[in-house]
Amino acid sequence: MSVYDQRPWLALYERGLPSDIEPEFENGLALFAAAVGRAAERPFLHYFDSTLSFAEVDRLSDGLAVGLRQLGVQHGDRVAVYLQNIPQFVIALLATWKLGGIVVPVNPMLKERELAFTLNDSGASALVALESLYHAVAAHVLAGTSVGVVVTTSELDLLTGPPPALLGGVERRRAEGAHDLLELARAHDGERPPPVRQAPGDVAFLTYTSGTTGPPKGALNTHGNVVFNAQAYRDWIHLTEQDVVLGVAPLFHITGLVAHVAVALLVPMPIVLAYRFDAGVSLELIERYRATFTVAAITVYLALLNHPAAAGHDISSLAKAYSGGAPIAPATVEAYEQRFGTTIRTVYGLTETTSPTHIVPSDRRAPVDPLSGALSVGLPIFNTVCRIVDDERRELPACEVGELVLSGPQVVPGYWQQPEETAHAFPGGELHSGDVGFMDEEGWFYIVDRKKDLINAAGYKVWPREVEDVLYGQPAVREAAVVGVPDPYRGETVIAFVSLRPGQRAEPAELIAWCRERLAAYKVPRAITIVDELPKTPTGKILRRELRQGAIATNAPGFRADLTR
């Protein structure tokens, strides 16, 4: 038996937690039915000043399901949901499940070519979209897709007071030929769709991801995957009906779908939604609704930390704060604790693992690896095994760096209509993550970087994440990203992009000197460019690839000059 099969991390579990759990429900719809039965009149969705109860969401999703069914949406159909973080997203999700359909969450930042690809690849028969997104994007591509039913809605719907500043300038514009979501739901108020049975192996979400290689692929997040990880979050973090979810992760992303929606259905507990992330608005809503739990990219916490109004808000209720999706610098956690009095714990997972595979226990702090300075992403959760392998897929001993390979009830069965990609990423049913890291002798896991981000500088391997952690320790640095660019002499050269904290000043030479004092010479950035903002995905991940391409194309300030040193 290998060291990983022995699961040494179990000895680090919080007292009272089992090594394995059995899901209490078969599917996501059963979670919601139980929530309505227990908490019908309790708040479910807070949206700025407005609140919908579990019962109200049940009635609206019932009515929408009946309406969609009459329009021809059937069991097994894919329904694309092209919305921001608004209550209608959850209503459309539940209505789709009530029809036995599959939800296709769509990033609201997608443009025409990207939306057309998602609709065509999924074979979606229906689209639920914001009016603004319909007119700007969807209307131009639907004719070439299989979408036969279009439902639109507005971010202004379901507000009980005047629109908040975040929605300033938004105007209603009805889409000709489309059905209005609330009108369709209310036209069938009091009606219920015929009951459907969804097995654990049926697909709940078709969630598009870049995967480990190639163009976007639809990960088959089954109801069994979703229910298991919702329960894992609840049991590991000790979430109760007194908790409140801060819904800052995009709902189209697996974090928002599972760590916000699914777990809120299971507990049950309310979710605070605010269209899209804004640090000032989030500070206000955390304080107003006493939000206690969230999972968000570290850039969200950095934005809260650096907001000018941070000192004027009490967000101490957010004691169950977790971060995943991108590496976390220990210095960031320390700064957050000093400002807000609560800590950030790490969580690790992928779209293909339906959110978490690793979480730091509630009674522990993530250790820092003394050699790399990396903060641990935690321990494998219930029922989960993580192995570290080399390029030939041979297991590596503890403390050696290799690729993370994951297995457990949260791992998806594969990709939508992609048998070759499925075979490549899931040989033997295990997910080869593309992430590089190691397990220490106790069982803590650390992520070093993505395999594709490795920089080869004159034969020396440089992991961007290690250099970024050093930069985050400089008091003036707000965010940092390190990339490798082609260099005729070294093969690749390390460069960095940095944004500064409000009111702080630092020169590139000063930042390079800071790194030179703390890193081996080959790891030190040869050039540093200071920018106002680093490019990010909607989930808050910094886009290293975009920075690298831009540096090569435009010769970032000081770039070529520094390469000649």
Image: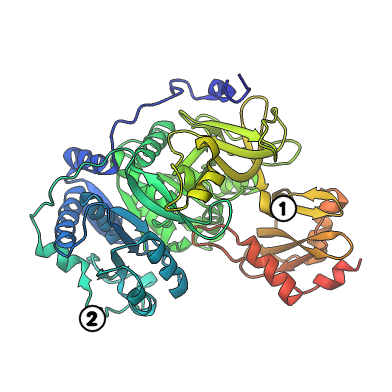
Q: Is disc 2 in contact with disc 1, using a CB cutoff of under 8 Å?
A: no
The residue under the point 65% across, 63% down is 545
* Residue for badge 2: 176
Q: Amino acid at mark 2?
A: Glu
> Mark 1 or mark 2, which is nearer the start of the sequence?
2
Q: How many marks?
A: 2
**Nearer to the camera, 86 or 8:** 8
Is residue 545 visible from the viewing direction of this image?
A: yes
User: For mark 2, does the 10 Å Cα neighbourhood hold few (<14), some (14 to 19), or many (20 or more) residues?
Assistant: few
With 272 as the anchor, is 341 left or right in this view? Answer: right
| Residue 376 located left or right of residue 475 | left
Distance between the Cα atoms at labels 2 and 1?
Answer: 49 Å
x and y percentages locating residue 448 in the rendered image? 68, 44
Q: Is residue 554 above or below residue 232?
A: below
Is 388 located above or below residue 316 in the figure?
A: above
In-front residue for pair 267/288: 267
Circle 2 SS class: loop
Amino acid at the residue labelled 1: Pro
